[in-house]
Image (cartoon, rainbow, N blue to C red):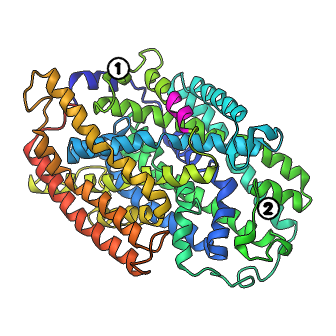
């Protein structure tokens, strides 16, 4: 890292240990997802949603192991934004960074969930599946409060988050126990259409459109704090995997309780017909568990609020890293020397979060698109891990501390998994999300033109390459996104159905493997012929 970037990086406080990092990961995973995803997953796949949760946990753990290697061997604040830049160049770094900037709207999803549950007490906050004008004002005030709470040192942030995480474990556990003790309905795994009433392909749809991927997403949070960890090579991997395991176990318990306690009277039209605005809260009222409903409506602020609290912190690290990448002005890279926090990045993200709540209505609308944005980071990280390893092998370097056994085969599998997750999101979401991400290519050209002007017209500035060469190095990502858009239109996940199931998913996997091989070769060539980017 160059001098200016390194100086700011050294201002980050290395105060986080294993439990602090684990609580960050767990709190980021367990937000509004536990309040809504059990309903949406059941509507989409019926009892087979249990398979979706197990698959999501296993697949996310696989992707996490690849990213863990990057966090352990190359710890850096906002690392998920920096690694694709290092490994694949500025085009990929800009497109991925742009998608991460757009994914800041995921924090808006948590705040929207708070408004949706708070409408139980204040109906004017949420109406007709959308946040009202008064709800938007309250949401903006809450966003401001979360920003203020993130203003001070990371140690204070970690302590507050540890307390919130304990409550976020206790309340779902109480919910599962109370619902099951209220009385269960036998045969729920076989009645009302059977275990998989909508086919096993619906398990794939539930991963994305049912909110499962979004709900398990967030495991990467400790990686973005790796620059603030005391011993990142040891604590970051353990924290990431522990957070995933705890969250998936909790989600399975909640899904099981939901499936077995929904009254038969609500299943006249099958699982598709079950509908609640506030799933667990209203289910508790139906079962005459008024005390549980009161607890749940209170926790409806705590759980997504805790995730939004962590989300604001992560967004600030991302914005800080994007400024290091020059996707944003270096003004936002500044770390306050007193608190060790990126204050300017926090302020910018506050504005982005508020703006992102404007065009979207309900929780599901936001998470479907935002999940697609962040899945691109997983794919680019898999390429980065493989490219770094290929480069090290070519130089004859020995295995370094922090490398994860098996990453050589896990990286391509992770890339395919991320690609399938994106594809399974469906045409309705991808026709909006993928063109938005591809806008990062003209953004790169605009930023590159600005760099040349500041450098007096020279072709190679700041350790970069001529634009055409950079575009050639990053062409794999553009081709992949265009191919996913086309396959989504042709496929069966909301598309035209011209490419039937399961061949559509098979083709997506084959294309992803081919692009991955191309991307790794391109990344290794990039690493051979140039030093790390100048930030």
Q: Quadrant of residue 10?
A: top left
Q: Nearer the viewer, mark 2 or mark 1?
A: 1
Residue 340 visible in rendering: no
Task: Tell me residue 516's x, y (percent).
Answer: 25, 63
Task: Tell me residue 66's x, y (percent).
Answer: 35, 56
Relative placement, left or right, of 69 versus 360 is: left
Kindly identify which residue carries mark 2.
177
Given residues 345 and 472, the one toward you in this image is 472
Task: Tell me residue 50's x, y (percent).
Answer: 62, 72
Secondary structure of the residue carrying numbered label 1: helix
Task: Determine if the magenta segment contains residue 351.
Answer: yes
Task: Tell me residue 390's x, y (percent).
Answer: 17, 57
Relative placement, left or right, of 354 versus 445 is: right
- Per the picture, the main secondary structure of the magenta-coloured stretch is helix
Q: Quadrant of residue 273?
A: bottom right
Q: Quadrant of residue 190?
A: bottom right
Relative placement, left or right, of 178 versus 235 is: right
Magenta region: 350-356
Kindly identify which residue carries mark 1.
331
Secondary structure of the residue carrying numbered label 2: helix
| Residue in the image at 51% along x and 71% along y | 204
Image disc number at residue 51: none
């Amino acid at each position: 890292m160059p001098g200016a970037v390194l100086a700011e990086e050294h201002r980050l406080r290395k105060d986080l240990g294993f439990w602090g990092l684990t609580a960050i990961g767990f709190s980021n995973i367990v937000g509004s997802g536990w309040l809504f995803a059990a309903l949406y997953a059941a509507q989409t796949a019926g009892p087979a949603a249990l398979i979706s949760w197990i698959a999501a946990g296993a697949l996310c753990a696989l992707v996490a192991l690849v990213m863990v290697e990057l966090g352990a061997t190359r710890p850096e604040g906002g690392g998920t934004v920096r690694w694709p830049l290092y490994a694949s160049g500025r085009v990929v770094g800009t497109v991925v960074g742009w998608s991460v900037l757009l994914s800041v709207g995921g924090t808006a999803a948590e705040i929207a969930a708070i408004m949706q549950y708070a409408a139980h007490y204040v109906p004017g906050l949420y109406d007709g599946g959308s946040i009202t004008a008064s709800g938007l004002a309250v949401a903006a005030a809450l966003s401001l409060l979360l920003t203020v709470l993130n203003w001070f040192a990371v140690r204070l942030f970690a302590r507050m988050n540890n307390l919130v995480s304990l409550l976020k474990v206790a309340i779902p556990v109480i919910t599962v126990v109370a619902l099951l003790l209220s009385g269960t309905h036998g045969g729920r795994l076989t009645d009302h259409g059977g275990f998989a009433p909508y086919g096993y392909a619906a398990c794939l749809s539930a991963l994305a459109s049912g909110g499962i991927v979004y709900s398990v997403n967030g495991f990467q949070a400790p990686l973005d704090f790796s620059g603030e960890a005391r011993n990142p090579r040891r604590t970051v991997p353990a924290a990431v995997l522990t957070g995933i395991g705890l969250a998936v176990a909790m989600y399975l318990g909640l899904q099981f309780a939901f499936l077995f306690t929904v009254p038969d009277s609500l299943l006249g039209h099958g699982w598709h017909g079950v509908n609640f605005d506030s799933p667990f809260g209203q289910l508790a009222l139906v079962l005459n568990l008024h005390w549980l409903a009161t607890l749940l409506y209170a926790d409806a602020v705590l759980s997504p609020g805790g995730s939004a609290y962590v989300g604001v912190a992560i967004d600030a690290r991302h914005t800080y890293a994007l400024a290091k990448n020059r996707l944003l002005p270096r003004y936002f890279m500044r770390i306050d020397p007193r608190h060790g926090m990126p204050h300017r990045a926090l302020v910018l993200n506050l504005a982005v979060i508020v703006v992102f709540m404007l065009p979207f209505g309900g929780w599901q609308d936001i998470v479907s698109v935002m999940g697609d944005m962040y899945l691109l980071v997983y794919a680019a990280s898999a390429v980065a891990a493989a490219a770094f390893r290929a480069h090290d092998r070519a130089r004859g370097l020995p295995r370094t501390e922090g490398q994860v056994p098996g990453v050589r085969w896990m990286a391509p599998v992770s890339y395919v998994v991320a690609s399938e997750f994106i594809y399974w999101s469906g045409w309705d979401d991808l026709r909006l999300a993928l063109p938005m991400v591809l806008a990062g290519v003209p953004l790169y050209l605009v930023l590159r033109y600005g760099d040349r002007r500041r450098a007096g017209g020279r072709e190679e500035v700041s350790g970069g390459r001529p634009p055409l060469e950079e575009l050639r190095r990053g062409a794999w990502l553009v081709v992949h996104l265009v191919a996913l858009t086309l396959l989504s239109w042709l496929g069966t996940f909301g598309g035209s159905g011209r490419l039937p199931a399961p061949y559509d998913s098979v083709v997506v996997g084959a294309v992803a493997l081919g692009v991955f091989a191309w991307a790794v070769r391109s990344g290794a060539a990039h690493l051979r012929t140039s030093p790390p980017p100048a930030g």
